[in-house]
Amino acid sequence: MSSKNLDTRTRILETAVALLEANQGRGVRMMDIAKRAGITRQALYLHFSTRAELLIATTFFLDELKGSEERLVPSRTAQIGIDRLDAFIEAWGNYIPEIYGLAKALLAMRDTDEAAAKAWDERMRDMREGCEAAINALVSDNMLSRDHSPQQATDILWTMLSVRNWEQLTIECGWPQKKYIKTLKTLARRNFVAE
Amino acid sequence: MSSKNLDTRTRILETAVALLEANQGRGVRMMDIAKRAGITRQALYLHFSTRAELLIATTFFLDELKGSEERLVPSRTAQIGIDRLDAFIEAWGNYIPEIYGLAKALLAMRDTDEAAAKAWDERMRDMREGCEAAINALVSDNMLSRDHSPQQATDILWTMLSVRNWEQLTIECGWPQKKYIKTLKTLARRNFVAE
DNA sequence: TCTGTCACTTGACACGGTGTAAATTGACAT
DNA sequence: ATGTCAATTTACACCGTGTCAAGTGACAGA
């Protein structure tokens, strides 16, 4: 009985993922998701009481789907600071395109919706911890450039790796993903690693 | 006769500037602008046929008001590439906080409104030309780092100097404006100037 | 076979914000 | 006195989100 219930819920989430990805997160209404999931718009609200809640649930679903945790393993296990930095950029930088549509939709709600803002910010805070860890790994190796304090370096790396920057470089400037990753590694090295 | 007409128009624009600045561009409705300008919401549409049009007109008004052109003079007249880069970062970087509210409002419409997107993108294209000129000045001095092609360096500088990055560093990370400017100069030097 | 439950449907409505339309007012110029 | 023109008042349309109430259809247990 509850399995049918669960089925619908996950069907909604799958649909949301697909639709957000296809449309790069723009113009995806509750109506569209419902229709494609084979239910009515109203039925959507039986599962998710607001659009923000649906989007947030979709992020967790997507994380599970794409294995966001496992991706960080290489970064966490790297022995040398520089490797850790590289591995983190590789992991996060390649994750962005997979969540881009959803991120964009959530980001668009951030300014008006309290819950969406909180969810997004929390997510970014988590990402920031990865940046911090990478910088701290450099500090441990005594390899952090004297130009920046660890805190400041973290702020910069965090900003460099923002979804918006990825968007600008790949979508607006037309960089291929590989170039994006490679260049960000270069920039990070140059900015943070003492010579 | 037309002076009263013009008066109202500029009064609207002044109000829009003030309101957008005060609210950091968030939650400013046609209604609010009209009320504060001392007219009805409907009368607003006698002067600007859409919200996007009003915002776009406001950008021009603001440019005039803040002297966006003159700010670029030091950058344009700099003899040495590195000085030009510094001057450009200084000019644009200090301009951002003055237009932030408006930029944010326009940016929020970008995803849904064709006209707003066009206006914003054009603006960013102009800014990009400044980046390009600064990078080209380095090239002329044979000082551009071998890490990047001029085009790539322009893309990077353009992205580094985005409004979103300014927002993240100053508002989210709490950097004072001076620190923002100083750090961006450091980063640009380190990334683009060959040693 | 009756009864209850549960997911979902149907159809309707409220709200906020943008944009449109028509009739009216009040000031000013000729 | 007449015309013009900015602005007003009132009203409505559209879109998307969210709510509500009544109804349907399937399935489960007694």
Image: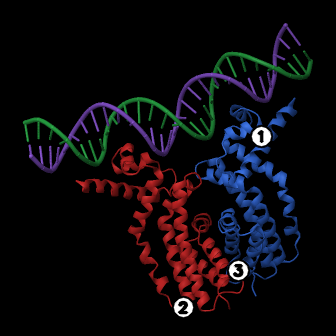
Chain colours: A red, B blue, C green, D purple
Q: Which residue appears at 57% of the width and 76% of the height?
A: A179
Q: Chain of mark 3?
A: B
- At 69% across and 75% down in the image, what residue appears? B153
Question: Dot 2: what SS?
Answer: loop
How many marks overall?
A: 3
Give the class, few, some or many, for how many residues have Cα within 10 Å of label 1's Cα (few <14, many ≥20). Answer: many
Pinpoint residue B102: horizontal percent, then vertical percent. Answer: 71, 52
Looking at the image, is mark 1 or mark 3 nearer the viewer? 1
Does mark 2 fall on the same chain as mark 1? Answer: no
Q: Amino acid at mark 2?
A: Ile
Real-space Cα separation, disc 2 to disc 3, in angstroms: 23 Å
Specify the subunit that label 1 lies on. B
Look at the numbered disc 3 and give the secondary structure of its residue: helix
Q: Which residue is mark 3?
A: B191
Q: Is residue A120 above or below residue B61?
A: below
The residue lying at 72 percent from left, 57 percent from top is B100
x and y, in percent, of residue C24 in the image:
71, 16
Give me the disc on residue B12: 1
Q: Nearer the viewer, residue B9 or A183?
A: B9
- Quadrant assignment for the C terminus of chain A: bottom right
Left or right position of A184 against A14: right
Residue visible at 56% across and 55% down in the picture: A108
Earlier along the polypeptide chain: callout 1 or callout 3? 1
**Between B158 and B186, which is closer to the camera in this rendering?**
B186
- Where residue A194 appears, as percent x and y from the top left, is 67, 89
Q: Callout 3 environment at 10 Å: few (<14), some (14 to 19), or many (20+)?
A: many
Residue, disc 2: A80
Q: Are marks 1 and 3 on the same chain?
A: yes
